[in-house]
Amino acid sequence: MTNGSAGIRRSRLRARYGHLWFVLPGFLVFCAFLVYPMLTAFRLSVLDWRGLGNESHFVGLANFSEALTSPTFWRAAGHNVVFFLAILMFQHTVGLFLAVQLNARPRFMEVYRTILFLPVILSLVATGFIWTLILSPNIGILDPLLTDLGLDFLAKPWLDDVSWALPSVIAVQAWNHLGWAIVIYLSGLQGVPRELREAAHIDGANAWQRFWRVSFPLLAPAFTSLTVITFIQNIRVFDVVYVMAGPIGAPAGRTDVLGTLIYRTAFGAAGITSADVRMSYAVAITVLVFVFMLTAATAMLYGLRRREVEA
Amino acid sequence: MSRITRRTILAAPLLAAALPAHAQEKVTLTLWHNHPEWKARVLAILARFEAEHPTVHVELTEMPSSAYVPRMNTSLAAGEAPDIIALNAGPDTKSAALAGYLADLTGQVDISTLKPSAASASLIDGKVYAVPILGSYTVGLYYNRDIFAKAKLTPPASSDEFFTVAKALKAQNIAPMIGPAQDGTIPGFLYMLCASSILGAQGLDEVRKGTRKLTDPDVLRASIFLRDLFPYFQPGALGTSYTEGKALFALGRGAMMEAGSADYAGFTETNPKVNLGVVPFPAAPGGKPSTVTGMQQVFGVNSKTKHRAEAIAFLQWMLGKEPAQMVVDTITLSTSTEVLPSDNRVMKEMIEASHVNDVRVWFEFPQVGKVFSTAGLKAQSLFLGELLPEDFAKALQDTVNPAAT
């Protein structure tokens, strides 16, 4: 009797939780490659480990308080916010405009779409190198081209100028990411029921009204996705800045972002010596960035989802 | 006991272990290196080693110097470093040795043939952990002989002469100096040279001990000289990377550049016809023309390697006369032994330049290790006038730690 009820209990447990065995491999991979590194990062952030050797001491929250009171940290974070806002505006205007044009199915649409999406396929490192070769004051082709066209008043050392360096790097990032905006908006536009637009047309709505009153509200999910993706991409931006402006965010930190700050803190600015590396401090900054991104992205998703429902 | 006998005795068991004549599988040693422009020359040296040691193959991975330190540091921490580990002499090597990443080579590698500076760079707390198989590099002022001859100028020896020459070059629409300031490497070296011209080796020792400061009025002239150099850099200097700067200089787009003996091979690789000369870096006011010298890394053996005997045999072979001659002739570095270049005017000029007022690179000393990187980090603000020389010097002095060991 006892054996029988135990067997029943086991088979019930198997029926209820047996599926967890199928989840286990994925869960282990998740723990190994996400949870464990994250916990390790939290542990490192409260030490003073340099990154070379075994010597380290517990310093509590000292790394966090140092970062939060560092003007360099806030300047870099400010540049990330500028990156995000500038690219967000670019994607929600130029990206949306191009998506609407493509949605009208012009001739050679596939060709246009491929050309516009091409920069996304290029790595940001390659993109950065290409644009460095274009913008360099020494070997770049843009300034000589402008001079030859009689527009020499527009020629300038783009990556050397304290006013133009950040906009130049942002423009390259925007060019590289434009394809995402087009694809996301295009898929959103293709999901807008044709009947709704036709009904509005019959009711006398012009093209602008059909877009603004019918299509655009239904693009709310695309807007949400793009905004959150853009936020994450630009708070994490590193490669394009590193390649175009170097590890110290030249000139004089004008292009410094959290990514370059973390990199040079963890590995050194010049790459010649490890004398200035502070791995634990760099990890503490990454933890702060992680917490900020998690909080802001969650708040964004919550706010934008509510807007979707209202729309 | 003669040197040769001692070396033979020391090396014999290692070579025996590494090279039992037959029936041994070929061993592959991994080696990372941070000068891609030397690859062909390093491979030629490795080929010579392999010809003499047929059972050993050295697999070379070259990477740019900017990527080398991050990759090596993370690999050491992850236990995935190559069999032969190349590190900067000084604090980096000491940290790696104390962490147990490097095998103790004391008594297994003969360093008796090394110059005193090279031998001291090999020792950590009296033990040998790594040896400078590629010798050392010296940094001075390269100048383009063709440009100088055409402009009827002679290379400068003092700050006053520098500004006279630079103004004359600028008047002829020639960039007086290539100063790639984007990543801080060149500004860091420029500061070391300017300050070393005032301090000399003895003055640097005083800074390390804390009895002299970088903010002292005489040493402050180094920061002022550095700031005043900037207007004579090529256009767009703040946006020019180190690699791009070297290429510009090799192609004759500027008349002078601060660079090291290690850079000469890269210059000729970019432009085989480039006609260069070397002098010590012009003295800051009150100083002597100077050069700085550092070890071209020191090479140790990974404590976790499965091929320890072969790795030690390789290091010992590299300290021999033939590879040292190849290093000095093809890679144009000063060697750690008393080997002179066979026929290389530029190399001889560099050796001559280093006899005037040579100081070891600061980042090989723990007390002033951070001055170089901080100078690189802050120099752009100094150039743009956002930082006064006094504030710049103070920022550097704040990183000096006489208590560091």
Image (tube, coloured by chain):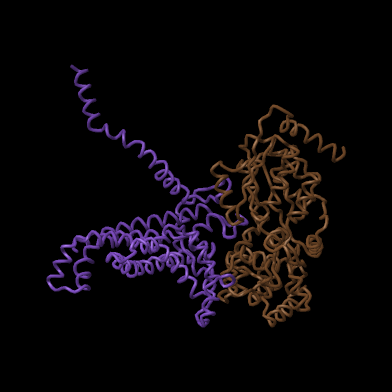
Q: Locate the N terminus of chain B and report the quarter of the image it occupies.
A: top right
In terms of image quadrants, where is residue B385? bottom right
Q: Position of residue A118 (x, y in %)?
A: 41, 60
Residue B209 seen in render = no
**From what the image shows, is residue A203 above or below residue A50?**
below
Side (left or right) of B356 relative to B222? right
Q: Residue, x 30% and y 68% (percent of image)?
A: A101
Residue extending farthest to the left is A203
**From what the image shows, is residue A140 above or below residue A224?**
below
Side (left or right) of A295 relative to B13? left
Q: Position of residue B403 (x, y in %)?
A: 64, 55
- So how many labels did they put on this image? 0
Q: Indicate the chain coloured purple by its letter.
A: A
Side (left or right) of B214 relative to A5? right
Most foreground residue, B402 or B311: B311
The picture's colour for chain B is brown
Q: Position of residue B139 (x, y in %)?
A: 72, 62
Q: Residue, x 12% and y 71% (percent of image)?
A: A203
In terms of image quadrants, where is residue B364? bottom right
Q: Position of residue A258 (x, y in %)?
A: 46, 61
**From what the image shows, is residue A216 above or below residue A11?**
below
Most foreground residue, A215 or B18: A215
